[in-house]
Amino acid sequence: MKSLKDDQVFYAFAPTLKPLLTVAQQEEFVLNTRDCFGNQLHSDEDTLDKLNWDAINPGTGPVAIEGVKPGDVVRIDIKKLEITGKSVMTTIPGAGAIKGITEASTRVLDNDNGMLSISTVKGNLQLPIKPMIGVIGLAPLEGSVPNGTPGKHGGNMDCTLIGEGASLYLHAAVEGGLFGCGDVHALMGDGEVLVCGAETPARVTLSASVVNVPQLPTPFVETDELYATIASAKTSDEAFKLAVDNMFDFLTGIVGLSQGDAGRLMSLVGNLKFCQVVDPEITVRFEFPKSVLAQLGFTGIGG
């Protein structure tokens, strides 16, 4: 199986990047990823002032996908997501959504038998891991978007739905798409309020293919249970509106519901959630259960 090592990285999505790997559509490939700190923190004594900040948020890639043309919708299937090392978390005074933190700290956390070990002043905890990919995307049409920034191309969306078994849909802007990913978390809550989750190196097995649904609003995620539109904007209000509008467009334009039917069902069974609130743009998602659409005969995207 074709693969890239964890030192074959880029730090900004850009159309000028040269692909390090080329794969056929539906061909499985492996990307080995570093944690968002570039694997620079190894103990609780490693402090942020020792970091090389130019090595933050590496993405492994880029990967060119044969036959992908500008305007195509690319489906990226996450076949397997394996944690390959310990996790690390940091606190940074003044950063994130928690304003009461005044001390910088680093904690290295063990991942054993599917559990994340974390110590607190009140005792030790074992939490079930739920790995997800924070940074994942394709190159934009022009310019350079740092890996830490989310947008229409994907990027640092920090959506907890993007884990093993999920599919992410994105519009390609350039030939081959130029795909990459990184910033895997062993566990992270919606919002990522501390600026980080359980940051961890990983081995990601993926495949990609073009789907003939050009009107699909992207970024768009599919899991076994639901569909979700993802949107990023400078404010949460703007992001919420985009995510809601995109789900409405999906339900009316692709599923074939009337405007009234789509609105009623979105209000009855849809859920609007934060993905992250700490990046240069806020990312949110609107989730809609597949089970409801199955009752109406909808067989899936491209079905």
Image (spheres, grey):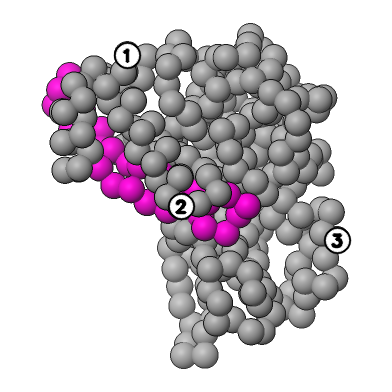
Residue 275 belongs to magenta span: yes
Quick check: is 88 in the magenta stretch? no
SS for callout 2: helix
Question: The disc labelled 1 sits on which kind of residue?
Answer: Gly
User: In which quadrant will I find the N terminus?
Assistant: top right
Q: Residue at x 52, y 90 (%)?
A: 121
Which residues are drawn in magenta? 269-297
Q: Which residue is at the front of the view, 49 or 100?
A: 100
Tell me the crowding category of disc 2: few under 14, some 14 to 19, or many 20 or more residues within 10 angstroms, Cα based. Answer: some
Please state the horizontal and vertical placement of residue 287, each as a whole percent of the image: 32, 41
Q: Is residue 47 above or below residue 145?
A: below
Whether label 1 touches label 2, CB < 8 Å? no
- Indicate the position of residue 292 as horizontal and vertical percent values: 18, 33
**Picture coordinates of residue 125, whole percent (x, y):** 46, 78
- Residue 236 marker: 2
For mark 1, what is the residue? Answer: 303
* Residue ID for mark 3: 52
Name the side, left or right, on which 101 lies relative to 239. Answer: right
Q: Nearer the viewer, residue 20 or 172?
A: 172
Mark 2 residue type: Ser
Image-based side of 244 in relation to 103, left or right: left
- In the drawing, what numbered circle is on residue 154? none
Q: Is residue 59 above or below residue 74?
A: below
The secondary element bearing badge 1 is classed as: loop
Q: CA distance from mark 1 to mark 2?
A: 33 Å
